[in-house]
Amino acid sequence: MSAPTNQHQAVEMERDAHDRGSSDHVDGGAAHGSRSSYVTGFVLSVILTAIPFGLVMSGVIGDKSVVAGICMALAIVQIVVHMIYFLHMNRKSEAGWTLMSLIFTVIIVVIALTGSLWVMFHMNQNMMPPMNPASAAEMSDQM
């Protein structure tokens, strides 16, 4: 589109864009989802929520660590579903910067969580005295 030469043309171009439903000045040209993509995302989200709920409530799998692993894997899949269907994140949007910022955020979160768990594990191993029943009985006798 050519640049408007006066204020009247600028107002007319704005009105035409508004009448056509264009909102380039608001969203920066980012692609929005259709109704079918939102419904698909919603259905996938419900399924990815119902499966872990059913596993936990029914007790089909006896090992709690296996159930927790399945729930975490489905949670990660659900995060991806939300990013694709609701946040419209892909390599094309905003020239890939949204994907790059997501990758950077994931790296920072993994570093923070791993470091926190590492510090807590080593603090527990190195700072806490071993507690056995005999020493607990001695402590209660001294009080």
Image: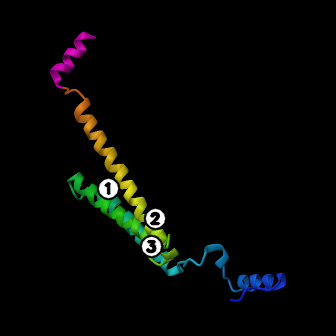
The residue identified by callout 3 is 84
- Secondary element at image label 2: helix
The residue identified by callout 1 is 57
Q: Is residue 32 left or right of residue 135?
A: right
What kind of residue is marked 2? Ser
Q: Position of residue 42 (x, y in %)?
A: 46, 71
For marks 3 and 1 on the same chain, the one whose residue lies earlier in the sequence? 1
Please say if the residues under marks 3 and 2 sit with CB atoms less than 8 Å apart. Answer: no
What kind of residue is marked 3? Ile
Q: Give the magenta-colored segment's residue range.
A: 132-143
What kind of residue is marked 1? Met
Compute the Cα span from label 3 to label 2.
15 Å
The residue identified by callout 2 is 101
Residue most extreme to the top: 142
For marks 3 and 2 on the same chain, the one whose residue lies earlier in the sequence? 3
Q: Position of residue 20 (x, y in %)?
A: 69, 86
